[in-house]
Amino acid sequence: MTEKPAPLLIKRYASRRLYNTETSDYVTLEDISGFIRDGREVQIVDLKTGDDLTRQYLLQIIAEHESRGESVLPVDVLNDLVRSYMGGGASVVPQFLQASFEMLRDGQSKVMENMTAMNPMTKMPGFEMMQAQQEAFMKAMTGGLGTAWGASGPVPETDEKDEGEDLDAIKKQLAELQDKLSKLS
């Protein structure tokens, strides 16, 4: 099992300036957004109190991108998120979102793997550049959540039987989540 690397530590000073402890320089929200797009995990802490401010700053980054017209989240999804915060009791929304993004990352990996494995176009000049553009596009679409290759190299191949079983398990989990969501409404 591969260990996740330690997140990039960003310290927030009383002046609200953000300090990258790896490079010993000040960074902006756009810089932090770039680190995340490049696949880095970040942790933002208040220097004085030690409070973890990561969630607050990540939400601010999303809000700024949305306000600039770089909309990724449909209004219906935003409404559902607000409802999940306002509703009483435990919400299944966080687990559902996490599972959805994991499925998206896994699907992205398989698409890229299949694109390279049996495609005669891989021998075409310029294919590597096209593949790099595709990976950049997928990274942008998933907000930098993983890459086509995963943390420790190419994603291992599975046989079709395993994929069918995985798909059945995913369908079952999705049905359970939908059932839980409908009971909350």
Image (spheres, grey):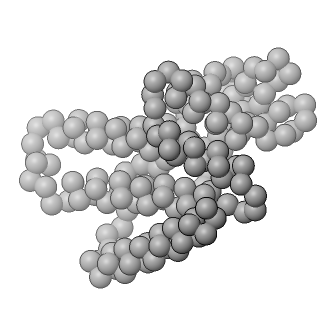
Q: Find residue 25 and report its image quarter.
A: top right
In the rendered view of the protein, which quadrant contains the C terminus?
A: bottom right
In screen coordinates, is 90 left or right of 33? Answer: right
In the rendered view of the protein, which quadrant contains the N terminus?
A: bottom right
Foreground pick, 46 / 154: 46
Residue drawn where x is 64% and y is 64% of the image: 184
Q: Position of residue 126 (x, y in %)?
A: 15, 36
In screen coordinates, is 135 left or right of 94? Answer: left
Residue 151 in sight? no
Foreground pick, 1 / 148: 148
Does 166 sit above or below residue 38?
below
Does 164 sit above or below residue 77?
below
Q: Where is residue 148 in the image (x, y as percent from the top left)?
A: 37, 51
Q: Residue lying furthest right in this view?
A: 49
Does 4 sit above or below residue 184?
above
Residue drawn where x is 79% and y is 41% of the image: 52
Q: Find residue 162 and report its image quarter.
A: bottom left
